[in-house]
Amino acid sequence: MASKWDWSTGKGLLGMDDPVEVDAALERDERHAGAAVIGLALNCAPEVASPRIVRAIQVLDRSRRDYPFTAAAHVARLNGRLTPELYAALRAEGTGGFAGPAIGDALTFVAFRDLPPWFKWQMVRTAVVSRLSLRGRWF
């Protein structure tokens, strides 16, 4: 049986809803595996997408490494929460790398009370820096 996903062009992969197919694509190191991970984030529950996003962060090369972080940002936006594995992966990457926008989306779309301590600290730090920069004060 032929796959309904076009792995040669990436067409249709944003509609991905099959975690087993994404696992296989990551194993084969498919060129468009990052797009499939984003599709999984858009179409599946966080608990289904999260392990594949974390795996993609670990295995995709630098030129495709932004895709899983985009997927994590979508999970935060669509669900208002992340899984503990995603929080850990974002924290490990830090705010200066590919994870910066995804961390920003988590701080925006996840309720403060639901954030782990490191993320709460990032929210406070960001608010203080923003406030000081608005007043033109730097220490």
Image (tube, grey):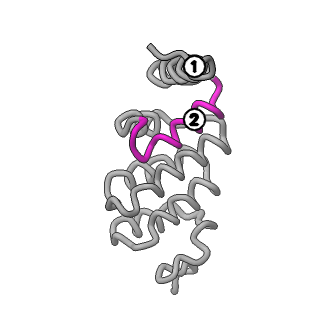
Q: Which residues are magenta?
A: 95-111
The quadrant where residue 4 appears: bottom right
For the residue pair 133 and 53, the one nearer the viewer reads as 133
Residue occupying the point 32% across, 61% down:
61
Dot 1: element: loop
Vertical arrangement, residue 28 with respect to residue 39, above or below: below
Is 118 contained in the magenta span?
no
Calculate the distance from the C-alpha at mark 2 to the C-alpha at mark 1. Answer: 27 Å
Q: Give the residue type that dot 2 points to.
A: Ala
Is 107 contained in the magenta span?
yes
Vertical arrangement, residue 128 with respect to residue 12, above or below: above
Residue occupying the point 42% across, 47% down:
98
Q: Nearer the viewer, mark 2 or mark 1?
A: 1
Vertical arrangement, residue 108 with respect to residue 68, above or below: above
Residue occupying the point 40% across, 33% down:
91
Look at the numbered discs 2 and 1 and tell me whether their residues touch, using CB distance below 8 Å.
no
Q: Give the residue type that dot 1 points to.
A: Gly
Asked if residue 124 lies left or right of residue 85, the reply is right
For the residue pair 42 and 51, the one nearer the viewer reads as 42
Q: On the image, numbered disc 2 is attached to which residue?
A: 106
Extreme bottom residue here?
Answer: 1
Where is residue 66 drawn, in percent x and y? 45, 55
Where is residue 38 drawn, in percent x and y? 55, 58
Mark 2 crowd level (few <14, some 14–19, many ≥20, 10 Å Cα): many
Number of the label disc, if any, that sits on residue 44: none
Number of the label disc, if any, that sits on residue 136: 1
Dot 2: element: helix
